[in-house]
Amino acid sequence: MSVIVKSMEMPKNCSDCPLNYDQMSCIVTGTRWWSDTMVLMGFDSDKERLHDCPLIELPPHGRMIDADELKTAFPRCDNSMDIKIASVRATINHAPTIIEAEGRE
């Protein structure tokens, strides 16, 4: 499951992230950036974010809807209506995804 924190700025590095624990590790991934491995890799928590950082920045967007659910709202019709509905479904299918689907099989 995902959590969206409205009005939160994307942290530029792990040290500035509100999800760091004691300035030593990530609460979400459990990665300890002061571990020997991270030091050997040259990771600098004051300058960068972890390579597996799960935070993503949402681009400016309009209202997000469930496109899969919307497609079921278009009934099957006859002749020219099928073509128009197929066009609407194709438009929905090719719309950019803002947040991936989750929680459904």
Image: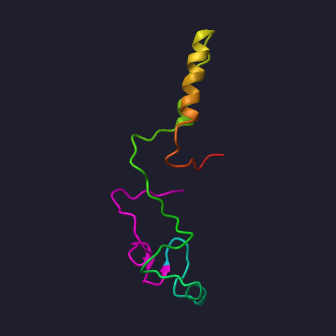
Using the image, determine if residue 15 lies above or below residue 105.
below
Q: Quick check: is 87 in the magenta stretch? A: no
Q: Residue at x 59, y 10 (%)?
A: 80
Q: Would residue 47 be found to the left or right of residue 73 on screen?
A: left
Name the quadrant containing residue 16.
bottom left
Using the image, determine if residue 79 lies above or below residue 84.
above
Name the quadrant containing residue 21.
bottom left
Q: Quick check: is 4 in the magenta stretch? A: yes
Q: Residue at x 39, y 72 (%)?
A: 18
On the image, the x and y values in percent for residue 62 come to: 39, 41
On the image, the x and y values in percent for residue 42 come to: 54, 84
Q: Which residues are magenta?
A: 1-25
Q: Would residue 31 be found to the left or right of residue 59 on screen?
A: right
- Which residue is situated farthest in the left direction here? 7
- Which residue is situated farthest in the bottom direction here? 36
- Which residue is situated farthest in the top direction here? 79
Majority secondary structure in the magenta region? loop
